[in-house]
Amino acid sequence: MFAVGLTGGIGSGKSTVADLFAAHGVPLVDTDLIAHRITAPHGIAMPPIAAEFGEAFVAPDGSLDRARMRALVFSDDSARKRLEGITHPLIRAETEREQREAQGPYVIVVVPLLVESGTWKTRVNRVLTVDCSVETQISRVMSRNNFSREQVLAIIARQATREARLAAADDVIDNDNAPLDALTAQVDTLHRVYLSLAGA
Ligand code: ADP
């Protein structure tokens, strides 16, 4: 099925935009949700994680001990790579399965790190970037997550630059101070483009 990869930095408005496509009946595949599900209680990533890192990283309910794993991979790059070696192929496989099973004219695959993690671009037909200024990202995430300015800046520093995401995009949604009706209008226009590209 024709697939649109939806990306953007933290706080750019990916979830907001994804919901507007969903309102048109477009199925969503969300790689963040999948990443969370495979490490939820008895998720499919848990046996290989326990084998690689030890049972100490498994919480009593069978889910990933996120705080413990975060502390490890924060200070140990090789541990982060070992973890991603387990999770990334599983996330890819689950995403592909959901894409195959999706019912609709086309599918939106939400991939926050599409630009950062190389091969995603080849697995979608089109890349849609939600764009806004760094200042807008900072103020949104500070109020959404109750983070300090420094915390948001630290996250942004680990993500691709605004320029890199724009360079990777086939289509761009401008979500810098966009009122909801302006955002909706941009989604409506792109929805028509995608229906046509999908041959629907
Ligand atoms: P992302 O999924 O990219 O992290 P979200 O869609 O969650 O971003 O948006 C981040 C925050 O900003 C949310 O609280 C959302 O409600 C708000 N937001 C997004 N777009 C707009 C907008 N155009 N105007 C006002 N608030 C917005």
Image (cartoon, rainbow, N blue to C red):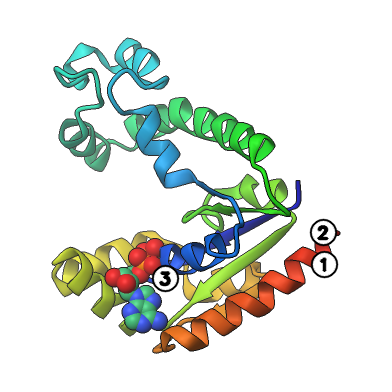
Mark 3–mark 1 Cα distance, whole angstroms, equals: 25 Å
Q: Please give the residue where the numbered disc 3 appears in the rendered image.
A: 13
Determine contact: label 1, label 2, CB under 8 Å. yes
- Image region (quadrant) for ligand 1: bottom left
Task: Identify which residue is drawn at 36% across, 12% down.
Answer: 47
Dot 1, how many residues are within 10 Å of its Cα: few (below 14), some (14-19), or many (20+)?
A: few
Mark 3 close to ligand 1, CB under 8 Å: yes
Q: Point out residue 56 in the picture as x, y percentages from the top left corner.
A: 17, 16
Which residue type carries mark 3?
A: Gly
Mark 1 close to ligand 1, CB under 8 Å: no
Report the front residue among 114 and 181: 181
Label 3 element class: loop
Q: Point out residue 8 in the picture as x, y percentages from the top left corner.
A: 48, 66
Tell me if residue 44 comes above or below residue 153 in the rendering. Answer: above
Which of discs 3 and 2 lies nearer the camera? The answer is 2
Whichever of callouts 3 and 2 sits on the residue coming sooner in the sequence is 3
Mark 1–mark 2 Cα distance, whole angstroms, equals: 6 Å
Task: Identify which residue is drawn at 51% across, 88% down.
Answer: 182
Tell me if residue 172 comes above or below residue 6 in the rendering. Answer: below
Label 1 element class: helix
Q: Please give the residue where the numbered disc 1 appears in the rendered image.
A: 196
Whichever of callouts 3 and 1 sits on the residue coming sooner in the sequence is 3
Splitting the image into 4 quarters, where does residue 13 fall? Answer: bottom left
Which residue type carries mark 2?
A: Ala
Q: Please give the residue where the numbered disc 2 appears in the rendered image.
A: 200
Task: Identify which residue is drawn at 44% across, 37% down.
Answer: 34
Q: From the viewer's perspective, is 28 left or right of 125?
A: left
Task: Identify which residue is drawn at 23% across, 18% down.
Answer: 62
